[in-house]
Every structure is written in structure tokens, then in C-alpha cells.
Image (spheres, coloured by chain):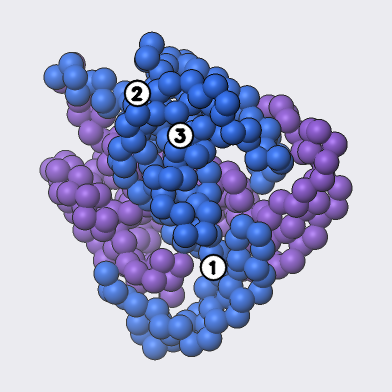
Chain colours: A purple, B blue
Amino acid sequence: MKKFEEKTISNNVLFEGKIISLQVEDVELPNGKTSKREIIKHPGAVCVIAKTEDNKLIMVEQYRKALERSIVEIPAGKLEPGEMPEVTAERELEEETGYGCSELTHLISFYTSPGFADELVHVYKAEGLYKIEDAHDTDEDEFVELLEVTLEEAEEMVLDQRIYDAKTAYAVQYLRLEQLRKLT
Amino acid sequence: MKKFEEKTISNNVLFEGKIISLQVEDVELPNGKTSKREIIKHPGAVCVIAKTEDNKLIMVEQYRKALERSIVEIPAGKLEPGEMPEVTAERELEEETGYGCSELTHLISFYTSPGFADELVHVYKAEGLYKIEDAHDTDEDEFVELLEVTLEEAEEMVLDQRIYDAKTAYAVQYLRLEQLRKLT
């Protein structure tokens, strides 16, 4: 796991924000030469593949300032300091959708942009959904619209680029795979 | 696509690097309040799902400084300024693996981290692979090891967290889905 290791010569933290921080590292390459690496540190995040009783996928539409547009995603959110990912998953599901779940299963974790960021996303599947009457509101500066769509509708939204991010594309593929596995 | 739009009040570019830049924007939220957004600008990237004639997936192991470890990924690389993604895809396939391809199909594009970055990854499938005798070397500061693995081996590597990033997890799922579709 250390193959071709790049040793840190020096590390300059140039920005520490509310969510991400930026550092530029001088590194020594395996051939002895030096190079620079621009690296974003991120606390990590979770996302939740949640299906209702009538087999619809729960999604949220929200504006993404980095993209200057809104896209449709599965519920997701950042880890708070020291928070266990499954706790974040339950919290974000409730905050963004008003649903609780009786079962939460970890499916996979993956880095989103290993070339420049250490953001690790933990993917969960939520089953046994139920509406929470007094669900916690979303974050004060978070505006989301809830959608419940069939798998076929979700696949259409991938083609239309309303679903346009890696974790949600993965989720749609996961559900289709799950369905095909039941048939074979 | 502008639902819940956040209007830019001011935009401070804090860092412009070789690969990424960082800006912090003051934005006006849909409820009239203000907030800050930390945003990474990235030129975009491609990745290539390439299978050999004997049905093995071509992968590269490389050290990722952001993660402080090496992981196994499908061939990938950043867009050069003004470069068409399919050109990048052919170039990266050749540079990282020594393979050319007779057919290149765009499968999907997705944002990797829409919460803070505009990196868009274009996913291609390469078919009709052939070894290029005088293939261009990899980048001077890029050290990669070539692997050719079966789908089953790739799925094991997902479980072992040697495959540990979103695009490669997507690729492995894509190939399993393709195989199951042939069976049903």
C-alpha cells in the first residue's frame, strides 16, 4: 500500500476553511526527483440509498454552488468531528428527507477524487423506512426538495444529467444490479 | 436547474495552483440570508474502462499523496487546456498502459464531489485494444504499475480496499451489470 511512496519534504497549509483545507506539499518521488502536490483535506461524508415500501428511491434536489446548478442526489452529508458514519447517515436521512429507518447497512466506502482530495464517502443502504413526525429540519442554509422516483425514472435522470454525480450514479447502478441479481 | 439558486455576492480566489484553484464565495441564499461556499475548481478528467481480448480489466496501481497510500484504479487523467475528453482518454490509456484502442465509447460523465468541487469525470469504454510498440512514456512524475485482472479479482479488490475510489467502483459495477444483462 506504500508502493511508489512519495515522501513529504515540506507541507504548507494555505487555507483552513469551515469544510475543506488546502495544503501544498513538496514531495520526493521514487526516482529521487521532487514535485509538488496540491491536496484538499475533507472530513469525509456519507450517502444513503433509501427505498420506500413501494420501491421508490428517495432523492433530494439541491443547488450546488460549485456547479452553478441544481442536481438530484441521494441523501448525503459531511461527517461532524468524531461522528461515526452510521450516525451521520441516520441524521442526514432524517434531516434531508424526514425518514427514519429500521435497518442501515454499510455497502462500500470510496474516495471521490484521489488525485487531489482525501474525501472518503461511506455508502449505506437504508431499509424499513418510516416517516418521522417531528423530523429535525435541514441545516439552516440548506434548501432541498424531496423526490421519490422509480428505478426507471432514476435511470432517465442519469441520461438527462439531472443526476450528475458519482455517488448517485453508483447508487442507480447498484439498484439495477440488485434487481438483475434477483432475476438470475 | 437553477432551483434554490445561490447568488454570488463576492468571490475571492485564494489559490491558483497547477491543477486546482480555491475560491471562497459569499452567497445569498434563497431565504435572503448569506453564507460562504468553499469551492475547488478543477479542469475535469477522464477514465477508461478497458478490457483485453481475454476479458481482463486493465488497471493501474499508483501512489496517491492525498491518501498517503497506493490504490488500484482504472486508467485516468486530467484534461489539458482545450483538450477534448476523448483525446485525453486515448492519451491516458496509451501513457499509463501502453495500449491503443480501435473503439472508444462515452458511457457517462459525473461530478465527483459536487459539495465543494466542480471536477467532472468523463467515463469511457475502450474496445479493440492493441499494444503500442513505441507507446509514450508516462508523465515524468507519475509512477504506475500495470495490472490485468478478471472481474472476480476486481470485485475482491473492492472488498480488500485496494480498489478504493468512486470511478473504479463504478467501473467494476458497470462490468458486472453488463455481464448480468447478457444472461437475462
The mark that comes first in sequence, 2 or 1, is 1
Query: Is mark 2 in CB contact (under 8 Å) with mark 1?
Result: no
Residue named by callout 3: B168
Q: CA distance from mark 3 to mark 2?
A: 20 Å
Residue position for label 1:
B39
Considering only vertical position in the picture, is B45 above or below A5?
below
- How many numbered badges does the structure rendering display? 3
Residue A133, can we see it?
no
Locate residue A3 relative to residue A153 in the image: left or right.
Answer: right
How far from the left and from the top, in percent, is residue B68? 71, 39
What residue lies at 50% left-to-right and 39% top-to-bottom?
B91
Tag 3: amino acid: Thr
Dots 1, 3 in contact, CB < 8 A: no
Of badges 3 and 2, nearer the viewer stands 2
Give the mark nearer the N terminus: 1 vs 3. 1
Query: On the rendered structure, is A73 left or right of B115?
Result: left
* Circle nearer the N terminus (3, 2): 2
Residue type at mark 2 is Gly
Give the residue furthest to the front: B134
Badge 2: chain ID: B
At horizontal 35% and vertical 23% (from top left) the residue drawn is: B128
Along the viewing direction, whichever of A63 and A66 lies nearer the viewer:
A66
**Percent position of residue B9, x then y:** 48, 87
Q: State the separation of the CA atoms marked 1 and 3.
A: 24 Å
- Which quadrant of the view contains residue B60? top right
Task: Give the residue drawn at x 69%, y 67%.
Answer: A16
- Dot 1: what SS? strand
Quarter that holds the N terminus of chain B: bottom left
Residue at mark 2: B128
Figure check: A35 above or below A139: above
- Residue at (81%, 51%) from the top-left corner? A26
Q: For the residue marked with disc 1, what is the amino acid?
A: Ile
